Amino acid sequence: MVAPGCTDDGGDEGTEVGTDEAETDAETTDSETGSEDAGPTDTDSESTEGETTEGETTEGETTEGETTEGETTEEESTEEESSTDTGNAEGADYAQPGPYSVSVSSGSEQAVQGCTLEYELFEPSEDLAPDTAVFLAHGFMRSIDDMAPTAEHIASWGVRVYTVPLCTNSFTIDHALNGEAMAALGDSLSPSGAVYSGFSAGGLAAYLAASQANNAVAFVGLDPVDNGGMAAAISLDVPARAAIANPGQCNTNNNFTDVFANLPGAPMLRVVGAEHFDFETDACAPGDFSCGFCAPAGPDTRSVALGLSTAGVLLETGADPGGASWWSPGGSFFDELVQGGKIQLVQ
């Protein structure tokens, strides 16, 4: 029997001038300092030394102000860009709740013939990626309610997240139809762009959706599971990344590594010690057999899995390039997690 939740197979200074000799000196000084036509013209136009001083001081102040202002503007611009780049490179602790409040609404749409999807939308108080939404699918024999905590967490970092139910979700599951329906829903609700993401069998549906949706921007897999080599036979035209748990029966021994082997440059990271359901929750609810079958290892591994998932989505939507700090060697969080033995770079 196949375990529920699894699939089934970053200036010049003013110069005081009062005589022709001083004018000559001023001209010499201006020539040496690179100023053009500074002292002489204004001096000739003034009648007293006081007026000359005032006039030239004004000019000097203006020249200095202009030079300083130009230099300051350039420095401020450079500093601002540098600060922004540094902030992006540093990222944030995406395992923690984000800074934005989240509102939840629901909707229903017939995505394809015979498949009406009842979804939920998690909207942040500030949308950092207004042109791109996230479509997040649940696992085999799970529901959108099970993915709600993950969706709300990701949305709290500034992106819209739709939780998408699988069109077919039983032992007669039709993975191709699930992918087709997810793509259709994404194209309809966010035609300008979508990141397709999913857990377990939902990861397979998301991958298939990303391969055919007109609005696909990227794929982010949460311990996704292939079925019969279906995903492995398809090469994506959009960026892809995935975080996976330890190999086990619920993720068919990490069979999505075969999919990524055909995607050169697509990063895949393993959360060391994580079980399949660490990508859904930190603890199974009482009586939740589906979750208990491949129960999460606990809050620590769940935290890493959630942080990676969130960082990956933020990076691919363009909401926060700082997500790379969790995914790229040299990134502050990546290096810390590797050194702490919490993640491994699979590819």
Image: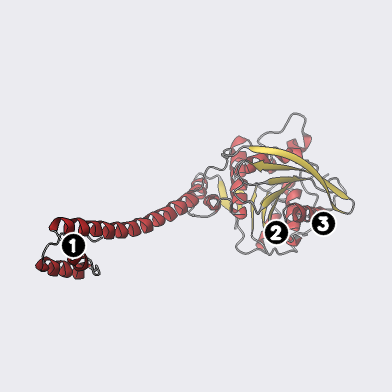
- Alpha carbon distance from label 1 to label 2: 70 Å
Mark 1 or 3, nearer chain start:
1
Q: Residue flagged by tag 3: what amino acid is it?
A: Ala
Marks 2,3: beta carbons within 8 A: no
Nearer to us: label 2 or label 3: 2
* Front in this rendered view, residue 130 or 2: 130
Quadrant hosting residue 303: top right
Q: Which residue position holds label 2?
A: 216
Nearer to us: label 1 or label 2: 1
Q: Secondary structure at mark 3?
A: helix
- x and y percentages locating residue 216 in the rendered image: 70, 59
Q: Which residue position holds label 3?
A: 176
Q: Which residue position holds label 1?
A: 46
Q: Residue at x 71, y 54 (%)?
A: 255
Q: Secondary structure at mark 2?
A: strand
Q: Residues within 10 Å of mark 3 (few under 14, many from 20)?
A: some
Mark 2 or 3, nearer chain start:
3
Mark 1 or 2, nearer chain start:
1
